[in-house]
Amino acid sequence: MNLTLKDRVLILNTVLPQYDARRNIELVRSIREKIALHDSESAVIVATNLGNNQFDISFKTIESITKEDAFYFTNEEIEYMKVRVNFIDSNGMFSEFTMETYDKIINYGNNTEKE
C-alpha cells in the first residue's frame, strides 16, 4: 500500500485503537512497527491539542502529504484496518482531512490501487 506521511500519522493515531482483543492488538503492533515514524519525519509534524482528546495535525512540508512510500501488509492486517475504518465511518467520524486516507484503506485491493 502506498502511504504518505499524513496517511501513516492518521493510521497510527486514528485507525489503530489503544485497546482491542489480544489477536487484534498483535495486528496493531505489527502495523505500527511497519509504519513507525523516523525522527526526521516526526520533526515535520505539528500537533496542537484542542482538548477533549482532540488534536489538530498539520505538516511543515508539502512532501509530507504528497510523497508516497510503499508499505507491505498481510491480508489480515489490511482486513483489520478496513474493519477499523468501517467502524469509524459507522460512528460518523470521517472528516475532509481523513477521507482520502480512509478511502485508500477501504478501497485497497478493489482495483482502485495497485497492489
Image: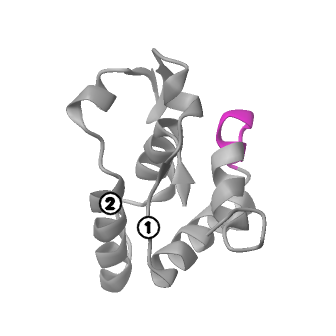
Q: Residues within 10 Å of mark 1 (few under 14, many from 20)?
A: few
Most foreground residue, 54 or 60? 60
Q: Is residue 51 left or right of residue 41?
A: right
Residue at (28, 67) in percent of width and height: 29
Q: Are marks 2 and 1 in contact (CB under 8 Å)?
A: yes
* Magenta residues (range): 93-99
Mark 1 or mark 2, which is nearer the start of the sequence? 2
Which residue is the site of mark 1? Answer: 72
Residue located farthest toward the top when viewing the structure as drawn: 60
Looking at the rendered structure, the kind of residue marked 2 is Lys
Q: Nearer the viewer, mark 2 or mark 1?
A: 1
Residue located farthest toward the left when viewing the structure as drawn: 39
Q: Can you give x and y, in whole percent of width and height, for residue 106 in the image?
A: 69, 65
The kind of secondary structure element at disc 1 is loop
Q: Can you give x and y, in whole percent of width and height, for residue 7 in the image?
A: 53, 44
Q: Residues within 10 Å of mark 2 (few under 14, many from 20)?
A: few
Res 52 seen here = no
Most foreground residue, 88 or 105? 105
Count of number-bearing discs: 2
